[in-house]
């Protein structure tokens, strides 16, 4: 079973602290596998392999636009998080999940990333957006005849088989914010969003439901929606858990539901 908690908008520093706490609890087997769905306020993050030169905006412009800058321990280069983007943080013990390759008993890092890509490809397909993987690159890309654009970024960290960080799916994201960086260090390919591909904004609730449903399919798990982290842990963990209006209810039930 994978528990799903939606947190609304969380600043990046709080998100990092929360992940550290939950990863520690998962390693101690005090909680089960967990998927956090949230939005971040505007922030540029630099992964372990990031080049500072891929942040092309000046500190003054970042301050003017209200964009924070953080280095973190996920894989990958430079990316942007902001409103209208669904960020997912799977905190999974990979030893729970069987590998597709019979030579390996459990999921490895590369196969885990491929599974995240599959979740996001299926989610985009639910909204009639054809996508694909790009050879040699991580993430999900639109499947266009003449060009391809990145619609979802992935960067993970794994410690003692427990995962953190995850993915960012551009739903109604303001694509102008990506002009502040060279996204993932790739200057030759543009960034897109589900809104841009379809020509209209989407209901984040519906997209989040699709993400959860496809996690269940790809990871062969039952998904349990939990109202708050307090309900999951039985105590306060020190970050805001009240959701914004547009993400407050994924289902009509008052408590938690199965997805």
Image (cartoon, helix red, strand yellow):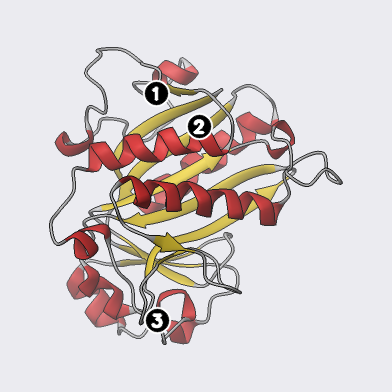
Q: Is residue 60 above or below residue 95?
A: below
Q: Dot 1 corresponds to which residue?
A: 259
Residue nearer the viewer, 68 or 48: 48
Q: Please give left or right for residue 191 compared with residue 173 in the image.
A: right
Q: Is residue 231 above or below residue 178?
A: above
> Observer-nearest residue: 148 or 248?
148
Say which residue label 2 marks.
Answer: 216
Q: Is residue 221 left or right of residue 89?
A: right
Real-space CA distance between mark 2 and mark 1, rounded to the nearest whole angstrom: 8 Å
Q: Secondary structure at mark 3?
A: loop
Disc ID at residue 228: none
Label 1 residue SS: loop
- Which picture quadrant has residue 43? bottom left
Q: CA distance from mark 1 to mark 3?
A: 35 Å
Instruction: Quadrant for the N terminus, please.
Output: top right
Q: Which is nearer the eye, 187 or 237? A: 187
Q: Alpha carbon of mark 3 to alpha carbon of mark 2: how far?
A: 31 Å
Q: Are marks 2 and 1 in contact (CB under 8 Å)?
A: yes
Residue 21 locus on image (x, y percent)? 55, 36
* Residue located at (61% from left, 29% from top): 25
In this figure, which residue is indicated by the disc labeled 3?
189
Q: Nearer the viewer, residue 138 or 28?
A: 138
Dots 1 and 3: beta carbons under 8 Å?
no
Residue at x-position 30% and y-position 85%: 58
* Whole-percent x, y for residue 33 in the image: 58, 30
- The percent position of residue 132, horizontal first and vertical second, equals 47, 63
Q: Earlier in the sequence, mark 1 or mark 3?
A: 3
* Dot placed on the residue nearer the N-terminal end, 3 or 2: 3
Measured as percent of width and height from the top left, residue 200 is found at 12, 57
**Dot 1 alpha-carbon crowd within 10 angstroms: few under 14, some 14 to 19, many 20 or more:** some
Q: Is residue 52 left or right of residue 110?
A: left
């Amino acid at each position: 079973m994978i528990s799903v908690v939606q947190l609304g908008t969380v600043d990046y520093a709080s998100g990092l602290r929360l992940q550290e706490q939950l990863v520690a609890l998962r390693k101690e087997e005090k909680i089960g596998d967990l998927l956090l769905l949230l939005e971040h306020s505007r922030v540029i993050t630099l992964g372990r392999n990031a080049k500072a030169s891929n942040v092309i905006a000046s500190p003054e412009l970042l301050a003017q636009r209200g964009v924070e800058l953080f280095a973190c321990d996920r894989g990958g280069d430079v990316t942007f998080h902001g409103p209208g983007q669904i960020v997912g943080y799977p905190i999974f013990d990979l030893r729970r999940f069987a590998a597709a390759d019979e030579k390996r008993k459990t999921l490895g890092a590369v196969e885990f990333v491929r599974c995240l890509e599959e979740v996001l490809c299926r989610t985009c397909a639910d909204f009639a957006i054809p996508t694909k993987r790009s050879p040699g690159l991580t993430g999900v890309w639109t499947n266009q005849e003449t060009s391809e654009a990145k619609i979802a970024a992935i960067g993970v960290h794994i410690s003692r088989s427990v995962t953190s960080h995850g993915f960012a799916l551009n739903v109604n994201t303001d694509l102008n914010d990506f002009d502040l960086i060279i996204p993932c260090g790739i200057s030759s390919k543009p960034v897109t969003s589900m809104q841009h591909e379809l020509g209209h904004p989407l209901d984040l609730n519906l997209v989040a439901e699709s993400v959860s449903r496809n996690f269940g399919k790809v990871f062969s798990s039952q998904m349990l929606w939990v109202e708050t982290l307090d309900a999951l842990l039985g105590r306060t963990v020190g970050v805001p858990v009240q959701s914004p209006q547009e993400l407050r209810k994924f289902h009509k039930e008052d408590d938690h539901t199965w997805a």
